């Protein structure tokens, strides 16, 4: 299966951000997709606007735009030559996440590949920065890569898919598509169930009773849910394993499962189906991304 026809790589001119190029090119070559390279042009800093004559500021701004265009074209030419892929370049203007989301919609991009770090160690493109804002403005999955000394992976063989039992398509479909681009992919469908919480009386500051039967029912429901999903996927030829984990710390449980099964990709959604769940699972995605050492596929769930 393939669902990728246009792949966007946001760049900022740094070597760290460029690590996404090889990964995106490998995915695009296997999927038969076109590549898009984009840079967001930032306006001159306020100190220049107040300390330099307008003509000087305009010249510097124009030079920056020309450099961005030349940089993108050089990167695109290298990929065209090396991989034989069509590459479109774009210099965008405005607030980065907003204009990137507009570009994704306008060009029908169906996967964004980017690194978690951009220019310098503190300007991080991860949840809480450009990637976080982008995920709030787009329904397109984002493959986030942690900078590394070795080449970035272009195939994934052990994919952990963290499911919340409410929405599965936005997370599962791109994970299956990425695994299908290689050979012998195995999918570990994981559901984390919280243990029973003590019920507090209105007047007391200590637990009065517990509901272990509630937790057990949740665990059984999760196992049945994963079993049904696994059966459907196995019928489609996918190699699937399932695991239900009982834990309060959802992100830590997902990361532990990824380590124990030597997963080379974690797929997670950004929120659940409604208000409170949206915040909880968004926090899970944030914690997973900040802590994981392997690539993380973050799939925004539709409202």
Image (cartoon, rainbow, N blue to C red):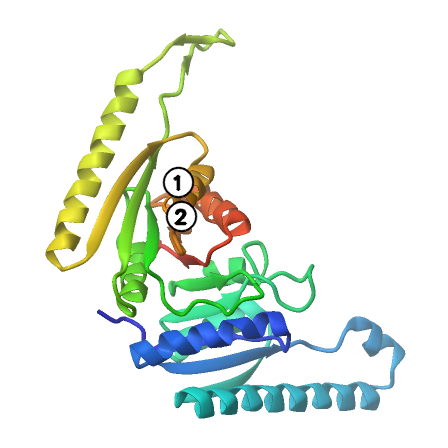
Q: Residue at x 40, y 48 (%)?
A: 271
Q: Nearer the viewer, residue 24 or 45?
A: 24
* Residue 229 % position (x, y): 18, 47
Which numbered disc covers residue 114? none
In the image, 144 versus 274, the foreground residue is 144
Q: Is residue 17 above or below residue 205?
A: below
Q: Which residue is more in the foreground, 52 or 109? A: 109
Secondary structure beneath label 1? helix
Q: Residue furthest right?
A: 51
* Residue farthest left in this picture: 235
Counting residues from the start of the chain, the first of labels 2 and 1 encountered is 2
Q: Is residue 74 above or below residue 136?
A: below
Asked whether residue 60 is in view, the answer is yes
Q: Quadrant of the N terminus?
A: bottom left
Q: Residue at x 46, y 69 (%)?
A: 113
Density class for disc 1 (Cα within 10 Å; few <14, some 14-19, many ≥20) is some
Residue 195, percent across and down? 36, 24
Q: For the residue labelled by badge 2, is the local secondary structure a helix, a strand or a loop?
A: loop
Residue at numbered disc 2 = 271
Specify whether 10 is left or right of 222: right
Q: Residue 269 in the image: state x and y as whole percent.
A: 38, 51
Give the image location of residue 245, x and y in percent.
34, 34
Indicate which disc residue 277 carries: 1
Residue contact between numbered discs 2 and 1, judged by CB atoms under 8 Å: yes
């Amino acid at each position: 299966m393939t669902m990728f026809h246009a792949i966007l790589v946001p760049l900022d001119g740094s070597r760290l951000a460029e690590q996404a190029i090889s990964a995106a090119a490998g995915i695009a070559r296997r999927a038969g997709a076109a590549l898009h390279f984009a840079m967001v042009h930032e306006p001159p800093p306020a100190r220049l606007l107040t300390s330099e004559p307008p003509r000087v500021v305009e010249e510097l701004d124009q030079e920056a735009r020309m450099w961005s265009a030349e940089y993108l074209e050089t990167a695109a030419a290298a990929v065209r030559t090396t991989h034989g892929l069509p590459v479109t370049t774009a210099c965008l203007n405005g607030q980065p996440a907003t204009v990137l989301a507009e570009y994704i919609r306008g060009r029908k991009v169906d996967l964004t590949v980017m690194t978690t770090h951009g220019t310098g160690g503190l300007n991080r493109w991860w949840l809480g920065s450009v990637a976080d804002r982008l995920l709030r403005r787009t329904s397109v999955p984002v493959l986030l890569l942690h900078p590394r000394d070795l080449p970035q992976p272009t195939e994934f063989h052990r994919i952990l898919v963290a499911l919340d039992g409410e929405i599965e398509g936005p997370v599962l479909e791109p994970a299956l598509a990425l695994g299908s681009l290689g050979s012998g992919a195995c999918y570990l469908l994981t559901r984390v169930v919280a243990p029973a919480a003590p019920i507090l009386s209105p007047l007391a500051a200590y637990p009065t009773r517990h509901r272990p039967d509630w937790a057990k029912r949740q665990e059984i429901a999760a196992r049945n849910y994963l079993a049904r999903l696994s059966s459907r996927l196995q019928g489609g030829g996918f190699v699937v394993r399932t695991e239900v984990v009982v834990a309060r710390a959802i992100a830590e449980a997902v990361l532990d499962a990824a380590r124990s099964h030597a997963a080379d990709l974690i797929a997670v959604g950004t929120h659940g189906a409604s208000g409170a769940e949206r915040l909880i699972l968004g926090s899970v995605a944030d914690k997973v991304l900040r802590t994981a050492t392997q690539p993380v596929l973050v799939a925004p769930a539709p409202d």
